[in-house]
Amino acid sequence: MKKWMAVLVLALLLSACSSNANQTNTNAGNGNTASNNGQNQSTETPEPTAVSEPSTDVDNEPPEAATPEDAAAAVILALKEDDMSALAVYIHPVKGLLFSPYAHIDTATAKVFPASSLPALTDPTVYNWGSFDGSGDPISLTFQQYYDKFVYDKDFMEPETVGVDQIKGLGNTIVNIEDVFPNSFVMDYYFSGFDPQYGGMDWESLILVLEELNGAWYVSAIVHSQWTI
């Protein structure tokens, strides 16, 4: 009897060992599967990131004036608002912008600025703009001082009349705009006078000289005009 009991116990022990071994192999297999899955995930090729195309928004492009009237309207508004950045957009890209205190342009003394060098109104530099009518004294002024006296000294945005390709104010001065800028187009913002006691001798105008280049219109000169001696 003891012999059979020993055999039974030995059989039970062998059965238990076999069961544990199978469980261990199963767990090991599962671990290998998980490991393989992890390796497969880590070696997957990521999707390429989309690259944004450069913006082609036409609103970022500088405006172009299709007619001289369009260019003049933009320029006179920029002058009224003291907006030199807006003015610079319409400056002739080849000739720059000439400033003349009188309708007879003295090309030897008139100041010319390319768009990239147009002074700021805060520029402290004193420039020689020519000579005062009558006295002959040099016009030595900062850009702001010249602007206030010889550019937008009246509300030329609301003139009494506008000469469309026509000079309205005429006096003793010989207007030589056509000689300096042949085939140009002018817009003359004109006031016939301000004080009746002067009988119209206090008239003033601001003349924009416009020229076409490659289908667009630009301002080549800003000419102040008034009665001269």
Image (cartoon, helix red, strand yellow):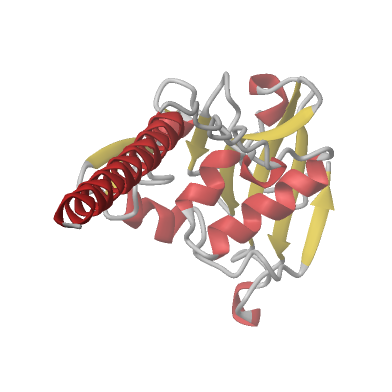
**Quadrant in which residue 26 is drawn:** top left
| Side (left or right) of 222 relative to 17 | right
| Side (left or right) of 115 relative to 50 | left
Q: How many marks?
A: 0
91 vs 193, nearest the viewer: 91
Q: Residue at x 27, y 38 (%)?
A: 127
Q: Position of residue 126 (x, y in %)?
A: 22, 43
Question: Farthest front residue?
Answer: 1
**Quadrant in which residue 154 is drawn:** bottom right
Q: Residue at x 69, y 20 (%)?
A: 179
* 107 up-or-down from 51: above or below: above
- Quadrant, the N terminus: bottom left
* 87 up-or-down from 99: above or below: below
Say if residue 15 shows up in the picture: yes
| Side (left or right) of 197 relative to 22 | right
Q: Residue at x 25, y 43 (%)?
A: 14
Q: Position of residue 33 (x, y in %)?
A: 42, 36
Q: Position of residue 177 (x, y in %)?
A: 67, 30
| Side (left or right) of 63 relative to 126 | right
222 vs 14, nearest the viewer: 14
Q: Position of residue 90 (x, y in %)?
A: 62, 39
Question: Farthest bottom residue?
Answer: 196
Say if residue 110 shows up in the picture: no
Q: Residue at x 80, y 58 (%)?
A: 162
